[in-house]
Image (spheres, rainbow, N blue to C red):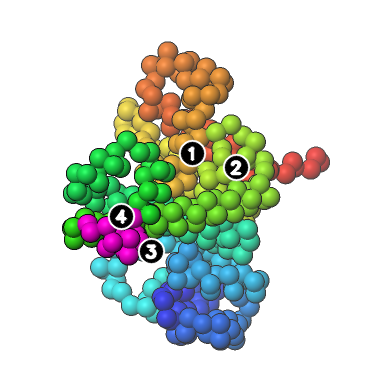
Amino acid sequence: MDTHRDIHVAAVLSLMGEVIGTEEFPASAAGYRDLLEWVRASGTVRRAGVEGTGSFGAALSRYLLAQGVDVLDVNRFDRADRRRRGKSDPLDAENAARAVPSGRARAQAKTGDGPVEIARMHKLAKDSAVKARTQAINQLKAVLIRADPQLREELAGLGNAELFRTCAGLIDDSLNHETGEGPVLHATHVPLGLLARRIRQRSEEVKDLKGRLTRLAERHAPQLLEVVGIGPDTAVTLLITIGDNPERLGNEASLAALCGVSPVERSSGSRQYRRLNRGGDRQANAALHRIVQTRLRVDPRTQDYYERRSKEGKTRREIVRNLKRYAAREVFHLVRPVQPQPSL
């Protein structure tokens, strides 16, 4: 299925790989029902390949999963292949359908219907609030650079918290007019006060959302918070990458590849070499990096490992890569414990 903001295009293939039909449906609740009814009119449907399961196809994926259809995430086709074969919505839908039986699409889509999806939305709002707060702080300090020297001297030496509180009190226009201040100084008070109040509002949002994320992590993944180097924010980031259905990850190597910490072979001839994996979820990769850096400061076991590998001639970069891979393995077994195989 080729997904867009307003429409979705579906293609149905037979067991022999022949195109049975292609149809376009609106991206709405009624459209999802009509799409599934149209597909089931051709036979039993067990699997579906959907492009954009994390964006335009997210709601469709949730609906299909709720209806008992296994959804596989289909990545965009290679651009060189598109140049050769051309591009259209029906052709993209057909390519997505063919990716399932060919095995090109193997990753199961996230269900997006549990606490991890709630955490994802909260984290999205928190990151936006942090970015807006940082922008407002930078703007406030830029205004101070061009402010009247007397005002700068009054505010000099104040910490950020006291500076913002003082600037927030400068917004009283009537008081400024009564003191007979110059128009430029008065105009400077207005943006300083507005920016300071904006900073306070964004800080309150960040505090509230951080508390919500902490409670979600403590309720649904307390085992992660017991590990050295993993705090609520790092735990939430990793859980968002894994999704509400961790069973979709077949083994620990799957999570390592998903986080971009699995080594990539780059050997040729007698030279055996593995390079850095530049793919995967970069936020999850950064979360694993934070875990490793924290452990290098406070965890004796990690510090001993670092010293031992350094004596073997490994660089700090190579050691950190190995530690990130080990951290991914540990997270996998905490989030998705492997069930022991029954003895024969």
**Label 2, on which residue?**
332
Q: Nearer the viewer, mark 1 or mark 2?
A: 1
Label 1: how many Cα within 10 Å (few below 14, some 14–19, many 20+): many
**Residue 339 lies in what quarter of the image?**
top right
The answer to if 176 sits in the magenta stretch is yes
Q: Residues within 10 Å of mark 3 (few under 14, many from 20)?
A: few
Other residues around mark 4 within 10 Å, as few (<14) / some (14–19) / many (≥20): many
Q: Which residue is disc 4 drawn over?
A: 192
Q: Secondary structure at mark 3?
A: loop
Q: Residue type at mark 3? A: Arg
Q: Which segment did they paint magenta?
A: 170-181
Cα distance, mark 4 to mark 3? Answer: 47 Å
- Depicted 207 relative to depicted 194: above or below: above
Q: Decide if residue 231 is on the left or right side of residue 22.
A: right
Coordinates of residue 291 in the picture (x, y in percent):
50, 35
Contact? badges 4 and 3 (CB < 8 Å): no
Indicate yes or no whether the magenta region holds residue 150: no
Amino acid type indicated by mark 2: Phe
Q: Which residue is mark 1?
A: 288
How far apart, in angstroms, are the residues tagged by discs 1 and 2? 12 Å
Q: Residue at x 53, y 45 (%)?
A: 233
Q: Residue at x 24, y 43 (%)?
A: 152
Query: Which is more N-terminal, label 4 or label 1?
Result: 4
Q: Nearer the viewer, residue 242 or 15?
A: 242
Where the C terminus falls, by quadrant?
Answer: top right
Q: Locate residue 308 relative to residue 65 in the image: left or right.
A: left
Mark 2 burial class by Cα count in 10 Å: few <14, some 14-19, many 20+: many
Q: From mark 3 to mark 2, how far is it between C-alphas? A: 27 Å
In which quarter of the view is residue 44 placed?
A: bottom right
